[in-house]
Image: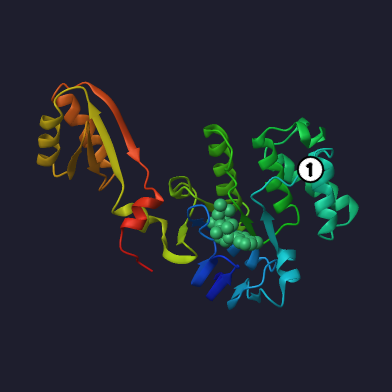
Amino acid sequence: MTILATEGLTRRFPRVTALDQLTVTVGAGVTGLVGANGAGKSTLIKILLGLLEPSAGGAQVLGMDVTSRGAEIRRVVGYMPEHDCLPPDLSATEFTVHMARMSGLPRTAARERAADVLRHVGLYEERYRPMGGYSTGMKQRVKLAQALVHDPRLVMLDEPTNGLDPQGRDEMLGLIRRIGSEFGISVLVTSHLLGELERVCDHVIVIDGGRLLRSSAIGEFTQNTETVSVEVEEGQDALAARLAELGESVTPNGRTLLVQVRAPETFDAVRDAVCELDLHLIRMEQRRQRIEDIFREPANV
Ligand SMILES: Nc1ncnc2c1ncn2[C@@H]1O[C@H](COP(=O)(O)OP(=O)(O)OP(=O)(O)O)[C@@H](O)[C@H]1O
């Protein structure tokens, strides 16, 4: 099922072309939109919501044309903006009920639905306090709740992990995964970090300078490129030789060895080789692929 599609989508601003002939199709599930700052992610979302006009080309969301049916699209699509947009004097409950009412829900249904989504995103007693005193994590949760309050078929989340500490990031990524799996709502989520989207997305689109760099199922991103870096106190050469004997692909990289992960057994092989050679393991960590790595690969679109 196609959730959204763009065709030659272009948006020019006076000094920059934010989107340049972008043609891409997104299916149901959780899709990551990755690109460096200024790549055109927010511009794409605004066009998809019918809030900004394309300069050329077109796009459809849930089968509706973005230039002629923006209001209808916004009725069935939730949007979590990147920047802070919460009135500091209102509580999360007041704000979310208001957003539900704006979407057309009757008063009682709006209250019930707001309570449900705020609980779902993990805001409990705090939801009655003014939002001005909230932490970044709490504000991000309210922004997510208001995107879900009208029971949309698709939500667009613009940099939802921005400003969060590692634990807050993990919690937000967990929530995003649940929106997709438990509630069956499709998600388009942007980030400048591919590594974090890898954990929650079914599909990833990478854009750079407004152009499509790559659009693939998440497995295709990680398959060939996932590596584990291994650092031992001494005996790096012996370890490399032993792993090569075991059929692993190993590349020395300064004080560490980069071992390509061909299957989960690769981790066992590293552990066993370290034990066998009686080495002192300092660190073993999975390397996250970064956007820069993709820029170095040939496009596969
Ligand atoms: N209203 C505007 N007027 C002029 N230029 C704009 C406008 N909106 C965006 N741009 C420019 O278009 C380019 C793409 O911006 P956009 O906000 O879509 O990028 P982004 O990938 O979302 O990055 P970020 O995460 O930094 O917001 C940037 O060069 C930006 O300066």
Q: Position of residue 222 (x, y in %)?
A: 35, 52
Residue at 81%, 41% (x, y): give it: 93
Q: Nearer the viewer, residue 26 or 267?
A: 26
Q: Nearer the viewer, residue 74 or 47?
A: 47
Image quadrant of residue 72? bottom right
Q: Position of residue 29 (x, y in %)?
A: 54, 59
Question: Can residue 189 be seen in this snapshot?
Answer: no
Q: Nearer the viewer, residue 21 or 226?
A: 21
Residue beneath label 1, please? 115
Horizontal relation, residue 109 to residue 233: left or right: right
Q: Where is the C terminus found, in terms of image quarters?
A: bottom left
Q: Is residue 210 above or below residue 128?
A: below
Asked whether mark 1 lies closer than 8 Å to ligand 1, one says no
Tag 1: Cα neighbours inside 10 Å, few (<14), some, or many (≥20)? many
Horizontal relation, residue 171 to residue 280: left or right: right
Residue at 37%, 43% (x, y): give it: 288
Residue at 41%, 56% (x, y): give it: 218
Residue at 60%, 68% (x, y): give it: 14
What's under tag 1, amino acid-wise?
Answer: Ala
Image quadrant of residue 2? bottom right
Q: Position of residue 160 (x, y in %)?
A: 60, 46
Q: Position of residue 90 (x, y in %)?
A: 84, 40
Q: How many numbered marks appear?
A: 1
Question: Can residue 295 be seen in this snapshot?
Answer: yes
Q: Nearer the viewer, residue 167 or 135?
A: 135
Q: Secondary structure at mark 1?
A: helix
Horizontal relation, residue 74 to residue 280: left or right: right
